[in-house]
Image (cartoon, helix red, strand yellow):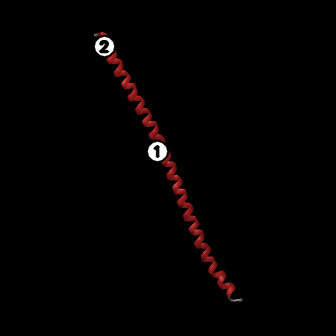
């Protein structure tokens, strides 16, 4: 019984080291995933703003064209 305790203690240290290393790698993967999700949200926001500006400009261009058509019809 006395010889088993040191053997168990000696084997438990590498097991704890393996588990700790595994936990660290899992946390690093979670951190990287969260970082990627934040970057994706930032890009989505930029895309939304860009699309909104594009649609606003297209609408403004359509209004100008419509106004020109209306003015040309009035001149005839």
Residue in the foreground of this view, choosing between 15 and 66: 66
Measured Cα–Cα span from mark 2 to mark 1: 45 Å
Q: Is 52 placed above or below 31 here?
A: above
Q: Residue at (51%, 51%) from the top-left corner?
A: 37
Q: Within the image, what quadrant is residue 50 found in?
A: top left
Q: Residue at (42%, 29%) from the top-left corner?
A: 56
Q: Is 37 placed above or below 47 here?
A: below
Q: Name the quadrant of the C terminus.
A: top left
Relative to residue 48, is residue 7 drawn left or right? right
Residue in the foreground of this view, choosing between 69 and 39: 69
SS at badge 1: helix
Q: Residues within 10 Å of mark 1 (few under 14, many from 20)?
A: few
> Of all residues shown, which one is farthest toward the right?
2
Relative to residue 19, is residue 50 drawn left or right? left
* Residue 48 position within the rendered picture, expressed as x and y whole percent measured from the top left: 46, 38
Q: Residues within 10 Å of mark 2 (few under 14, many from 20)?
A: few
Query: What residue did someone put label 1 on?
Result: 43
Q: Is 59 placed above or below 73 here?
A: below
Q: Residue at (52%, 52%) from the top-left corner?
A: 35
Q: Within the image, what quadrant is residue 14 found in?
A: bottom right
SS at badge 2: helix
Query: What residue did someone put label 2 on?
Result: 73
* Residue 1 position within the rendered picture, expressed as x and y whole percent measured from the top left: 71, 89
* Residue 57 position within the rendered picture, expressed as x and y whole percent measured from the top left: 40, 29
């Amino acid at each position: 019984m006395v010889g088993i305790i040191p053997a168990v203690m000696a084997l438990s240290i590498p097991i704890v080291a393996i588990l700790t290393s595994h936990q660290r790698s899992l946390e690093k993967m979670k951190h990287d995933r969260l970082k990627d999700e934040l970057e994706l949200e930032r890009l989505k926001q930029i895309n939304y703003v860009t699309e909104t500006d594009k649609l606003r400009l297209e609408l403004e261009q359509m209004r100008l064209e419509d106004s020109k058509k209306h003015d040309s019809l009035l001149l005839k």
